[in-house]
Image: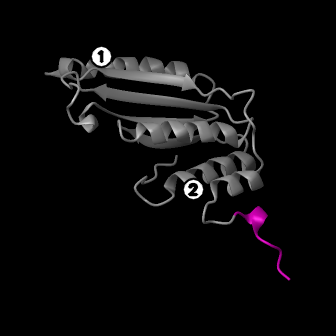
């Protein structure tokens, strides 16, 4: 389980690197990456998902997201108050994970909606398999690092000692 502090510099990059390395070195591993959702973070999360899909064709990536929406939010209000949520990106979840999560989250949402003022905060859950784009160009490790120009040099690009 990876639950990083995304406020730290280059955290998304390190998470992608870990996801790829764990998949490559331990093919049967189930890796869970946690993240927050908000109007400000959502574009970065979606971009991260797209980039994760490009890492390796053999990854079986799923997202599970729970969002709570502010029903009283109106156009012109602070965008950050529109919704909040959290999610996980899972590589190689156990066989029935999607069905079990949907069932469990349905019960949780039903219970939470019994609370006072719950009608002002509608909740939703989304379980989705991230499909690889058949036309996508999957990049080699070298191309991945060169394209993103990260300030960390991967092992494959380190020149051999003389």
Q: Which region of the structure is painted magenta? A: 154-162
Q: Is any part of residue 30 visible from this angle? A: no
In the image: residue 103, left or right of residue 159: left
Q: Nearer the viewer, mark 2 or mark 1?
A: 2
Q: Residue furthest bottom?
A: 162
Q: Split into 4 quadrants, where in the image is the C terminus?
A: bottom right
The first of marks 2 and 1 along the sequence is 2
Residue 33: % across, % down: 52, 43
Query: Mark 2 — residue?
Result: 14
In the image: residue 146, left or right of residue 76: right
Real-space Cα separation, disc 2 to disc 1, in angstroms: 36 Å
Q: Residue furthest right?
A: 162
Q: Residue furthest left?
A: 116
Indicate whether residue 160 is drawn in magenta: yes
Pick the residue in front: 136 or 105.
136
What is the quadrant of residue 8 in the picture?
bottom left
Residue 141: % across, % down: 75, 52
How many numbered tags mark residues here? 2
In the image: residue 97, left or right of residue 4: right
Indicate whether residue 70 is drawn in magenta: no
Q: Find numbered disc 1 in the image and state the secondary structure of the residue it sits on.
A: helix
Q: Main secondary structure of the magenta part?
A: loop
Q: What is the crowding at mark 2: few (fewer than 14 residues within 10 Å), some, or many (at least 20)?
A: some
Q: What is the crowding at mark 1: few (fewer than 14 residues within 10 Å), some, or many (at least 20)?
A: few
Question: Which disc is residue 110 wearing?
Answer: 1
Residue occupying image coordinates x 35% and y 18%: 107
Residue occupying image coordinates x 50% and y 23%: 127
In the image: residue 19, left or right of residue 33: right
| Label 2 close to label 1 by CB (< 8 Å) | no
Q: Is any part of residue 52 visible from this angle? A: yes
Residue occupying image coordinates x 74% and y 35%: 58
């Amino acid at each position: 389980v990876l639950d990083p502090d995304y406020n730290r510099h280059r955290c998304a990059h390190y998470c992608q690197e870990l996801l790829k390395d764990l998949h490559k070195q331990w093919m049967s591993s189930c890796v869970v990456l946690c993240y927050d959702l908000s109007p400000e973070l959502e574009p970065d999360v979606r971009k991260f998902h797209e980039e994760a899909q490009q890492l390796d064709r053999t990854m079986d990536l799923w997202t599970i997201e729970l969002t709570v929406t502010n029903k009283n939010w109106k156009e012109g209000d602070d965008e950050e108050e529109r919704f909040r949520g959290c999610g996980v990106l899972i590589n190689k979840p156990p066989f029935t994970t999607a069905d079990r999560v949907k069932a469990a989250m349905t019960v949780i949402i039903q219970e939470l909606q019994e609370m006072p003022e719950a009608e002002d905060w509608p909740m939703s859950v989304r379980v989705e398999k991230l499909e690889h784009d058949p036309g996508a160009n999957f990049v080699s490790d070298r191309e991945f690092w060169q394209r993103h120009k990260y300030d960390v040099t991967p092992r494959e690009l380190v020149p051999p000692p003389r």
